[in-house]
Image: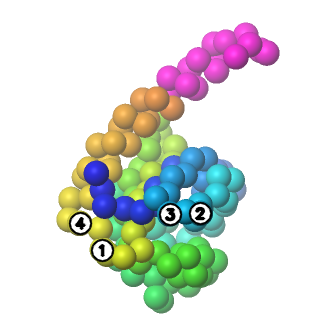
Amino acid sequence: MLDAEHAFIGRYDPDGTLEVIAAWTSAAAALIAVGTRFSTGGRNLITPVLQTGRPARLDEYFSAPGATGTFVRESGIRATVGAPVSVEGQLWGLMAVASEEELLPPGTEERLAAFTELAATAIANAQARAETSPSGSG
């Protein structure tokens, strides 16, 4: 649907990081493992989504500084698009897709943002169930 080889969902934490909570890849090996943490700040995809609460695109990482830029370059990712996940009106995290081969097509931001609305509904429902279920029951 989005011409991307990789996708992940991450949650922004109060300590200024984003923790990957779900990941998918079309490659043989996972590129981004669940539990991976990325620092916010600098030139990367996760920072503008956090700062603006809007979808963002980064089409090259050749000059991106810091650990996130290094990770992306070493993993072979060429382009990324991310969209915010807002739960009950609050920025909760981000969903991102990445491509190793090509730039992601125009309109990817809007398509991903529409999908994150569905993800946000599922997250809100899961949180509500967790808050109302008795401790110890599944």
Q: Are marks 1 and 4 in contact (CB under 8 Å)?
A: yes
Task: Give the residue displayed 38% in from the left and 43% down from the top.
Answer: 116
Nearer to us: label 3 or label 4: 3
Of the numbered discs 2 and 4, the one sitting upstream in the chain is 2
Residue 61 can be seen, yes or no: yes
**Residue bearing mark 3:** 27
The location of residue 130, given as percent across then percent down, is 64, 21
Task: Give the residue displayed 61% in from the left and 47% down from the top.
Answer: 21
Numbered label attached to residue 105: 4
Packing grade of label 3 (10 A; few <14, some 14-19, many >=20) is few
**Residue bearing mark 1:** 103
The location of residue 15, given as percent across then percent down, is 69, 56
- Magenta stretch, main secondary structure class: helix
Residue 48 can be seen, yes or no: no
As measured in the structure, the alpha-carbon distance from the residue carrying label 2 to the one carrying label 4 is 24 Å
Numbered label attached to residue 29: 2
Q: Nearer the viewer, residue 48 or 34?
A: 34
Dividing the picture into quadrants, the one containing residue 138 is: top right
SS class, disc 1: loop
As measured in the structure, the alpha-carbon distance from the residue carrying label 1 to the one carrying label 4 is 6 Å
Of the numbered discs 1 and 3, the one sitting upstream in the chain is 3
Quick check: 118 left or right of 131? left
As measured in the structure, the alpha-carbon distance from the residue carrying label 2 to the one carrying label 3 is 6 Å
Quick check: 59 left or right of 71? left
What amino acid is at disc 2?
A: Ala
As measured in the structure, the alpha-carbon distance from the residue carrying label 1 to the one carrying label 3 is 17 Å
